[in-house]
Each structure stands twice: as structure tokens, then as C-alpha cells.
Image (cartoon, grey):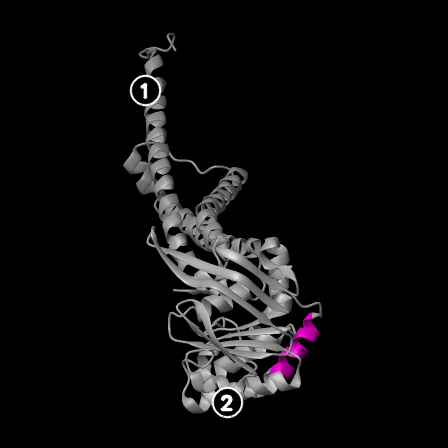
Amino acid sequence: MQNVPGVMPIESPNLFLAFRRQISGLLGAMLGILSITGILSLVLIGLVLSMAANERRREMGVLKALGATRGFVFKVLVIEAGLLALAGALPGLALAALTVYLFRSLIIRGLGVPFLYPSPLQLLGLVGACIIGALMGVTLAAAYPAWRVSREDAAISMRE
Amino acid sequence: MIELRDVSKTYTLDGDQAVEAVRDASLSVSQGEFVIITGRSGSGKTTLLNLVGGMTRPTAGQVLIDGVDLWQLGDREQSRLRSQKFGFIFQFPSLLPSLTVLENVALPAMFGADGSGQEDTRRSQELLELVGLAEKLHAYPRQLSAGQQQRVVVARALLNQPAILLADEPTSDLDEQTEHEIMQLLRDIYRRTAITILLVTHTSQLVSYGSRALKMAAGAIIDESA
């Protein structure tokens, strides 16, 4: 470059470092927000599922009277919560993908960083991880209310 | 067949307030009896029935079914015994709203019957014919009257051919005519089979349907008349 007339190279090791720091900061902030949202969601889902299990205590009491074991009642409530998680996660992911696709240029302009789609394989992995995460989170949140209802005397469950 | 030995049940309300729903109740019921237990609200009738059916654990005493202490059994054995030995009729609407009448009646087969799915369906249809609802197989509970719903519950209670039928105020929400029809139906079932029936009610006029009457007050069995 020094041999090209009128052109002078500038050494700037900080150029990429600053950019990398900006990206790392952004990623860290996003992960932080995501973690807080995840914990709050888990608590909220736990409360909602606890209310849902409470609403169905009488029904579970009837099932126990008909011969359902505690394990059966526990499974019914947890599987139901899992199905709800799937029913929420699949449209949620589709909606997120559509939003990113439609507002890609806006995101790039807003954040001031280039934005590339991950490879299809990575994308598939991320979708799988999201679904597994949602299922695990909801199962965890549903476990306690389901356990509580399954342990209760059928007579108590039926008395509202 | 059914034996209660000095059974008591105390509920704890709001953390520390204790209510003794049943106290030192002893009772022996032989196979083929139709026992009607009467008493005012809060006398402990429903709790006594729940104790017999293993739906609540006694605070003291023993509940024996064919000589087996219910509460010495594990959850799995107790659930199996409940599905095979008992049929329950509840006071409140107990049909699952998302299932059809036929599916509701076949529900106990899921937990206890040895038959195939086809056999369970056939038997459910027979029972619905028995209770006069053969034309309502595919209806949903919300499409039935309270009396019809209670007939479906009777059919469901009989699916696994139980030896004992426990009925908790089965006619409390029904008009006089429907009450009579349901009681007549129970008496017909009692006469046709060797089933043992324990029925609790606050209506003392229903005593005439049974073969034995008991009265409860303040958690104790206070009167027995054959």
C-alpha cells in the first residue's frame, strides 16, 4: 500500500476491538434481559398453572375416585401443561421468525450492527433448543402444583 | 364386607382450627345390604362415606374392606381396589364436560376393567340402556338435564361391576319426581344384583328405599333401625 501513490495505511488495532466490545455488550445486555424475562415467565407460568390445577381439583378428585393413581393425576396435569407449552412455543417461534424477517433492515439500522441469518442447521438447532427450553420450563413450573393436587385426598379435592 | 372400627376424622381449618367430622364411628355392613344414612347437614354423613371409599384418610381407627385395611395398602393397590370394588355417585355434577355420555360411562374402564375397548363400549351402551338413556350416547353432559346427568353417573358407577355402590346425596339437586325416579332406579339395580349400597341423604323420607337405616349427628352414628 505504501507503494501506491497518495495512499497511506493506517494501523488501527482498536477499530475491531471497539466493534467487538460493542457487540459483546449488546449480547450481554440481551442475555441479561432474556434471563430476567425467563425467570419472571417461569414464576408467572407457575402461578397460572397452579390456578389451573386448582380449578381442576374436583375433576382430579373424581378421577381418583374412579381409580386413578396419584401418578396418573400428576402425569395428566404435567402433560397438559407440556401441550400448552408446545401450543404456545410453536406459533411464538413462527411469529418471532416472521418479525425478524420483515423488520430485518429496521433492526440493522436501529442497532447499528450488521445482521446475518444463521445457517439453516443452526436455525433448526435454535428452534429445537427453544422448544426444549419451553417444555422444560413449563414442566418445572407445573411440577409443584401437579404434585400438590395429586397428593391431596380425593375427598378434599372434591370439596370446593 | 365393610367394617369401620372406631374411626374418627378431624379436619384442620385455617391452620389451627380443628373440626371433628366423624368421631369413634363403628359400623359393619354385610354384602347385599342397602344402607341409608340420614342426618342434618354437617353431621358427618359425607365424611363417613368418603372414609368407607378410601377417599380420605382417617385420623384414627381402621377401615376394612373384605378384611383388608384400606390404609395399609399403597396408592396403586388402593386405587385398584377403588376402581374394582366401588362405584361412586356424587352430589355435584361429576361428568367430564369434554367427553360424550358414552365416553364418560366408559371412563372407569381406563383404570380397572380387564375387558377390551369394544367390550367396555358394549357394556357402557348396555348400562345406558338400563338407565334409560340409550338415545343419548353421543350427547355431551351440558345437553342433558340434571336428572339425566345423574342417571349417566349411575351407569358410570356400575361399569366395573362393583360390589359396593357409594351414593352421596344423589338426589339433592333434583325435583321430587326425578328424585323418586333415581331412587327407584337404585332400588331396581339393588334388587337385580347382589350389590351393597351405602347412600347418604338429609331427606329422611328416602329411608323406605333401603334395607337398613342409620342416623348421624355431630359426627357419630346415633341411631340404627333395621
Range shown magenta: B117-127
Tell me if residue B54 can be seen. no
Q: Is residue A33 above or below residue B7?
A: above
The quarter of the picture where residue A35 lies is top left
Location of residue B163 (image quadrant): bottom right
For marks 2 and 1, give the one nearer the viewer.
2
Q: Do labels 2 and 1 touch, CB within 8 Å?
A: no
Q: Tag 2: residue type?
A: Glu
Q: Camera-side residue: A132 or A146? A: A146
Q: Which residue is mark 1?
A: A18
The furthest residue to the top: A3
* Residue visible at 38% across and 7% down in the picture: A3
Depth order, front residue of B36/A122: B36
How far across and down, in percent of the image, does residue B78 sit?
61, 59
Label 2 sits on residue: B181
Q: Is residue A25 left or right of residue A143?
A: left
Q: Residue at x 65, y 60 (%)?
A: B68
